[in-house]
Amino acid sequence: YAREAVSDLVTRAGFPQLLLEPVNFEIMYAEQMREQQAQAEGATQ
């Protein structure tokens, strides 16, 4: 939703179209959890 709103505002302002890549928050969260888990395992060894 936010991506569409920003793109629409930029276009209405007369600037060239701005295409933002979609963000997958689920994957970002999973990667962060994996990194934290790896750090925790490294700290206990």
Image: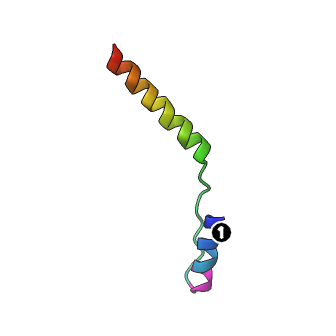
Highlighted magenta segment, given as a residue range: 10-14
For the point 40% across and 19% down, the residue is 41
Residue 5 at what x, y percent from top left? 63, 72
Question: Which of the 4 image quarters holds residue 4?
Answer: bottom right
Residue 1 at what x, y percent from top left? 66, 64
Q: Nearer the viewer, residue 42 or 8?
A: 42
Q: Main secondary structure of the magenta part?
A: helix
Residue 16 at what x, y percent from top left? 57, 78
Identify the image's colour scheme: rainbow, by chain, secondary structure or one colour.
rainbow
Q: Is residue 34 magenta?
A: no
4 sits left or right of 32 in the view = right
For the point 55% across and 82% down, the residue is 15
| Residue, disc 1 | 4
25 sits left or right of 34 in the view = right
Question: Which of the 4 image quarters holds residue 44?
Answer: top left
For the point 59% across and 53% down, the residue is 23
Residue 17, above or below 33: below
Residue type pointed to by label 1: Glu
For the point 59% across and 58% down, the residue is 21
Q: Nearer the viewer, residue 10 or 35?
A: 35
Q: Nearer the viewer, residue 44 or 21?
A: 44
Dot 1 lies on which element? helix
Q: Is residue 12 magenta?
A: yes
As drawn, the residue found furthest toward the top would be: 45
How many circles with numbers are drawn on the protein? 1
Q: Residues within 10 Å of mark 1 (few under 14, many from 20)?
A: few
Residue 24 at what x, y percent from top left? 61, 48
The quadrant of the image that shows the C terminus is: top left
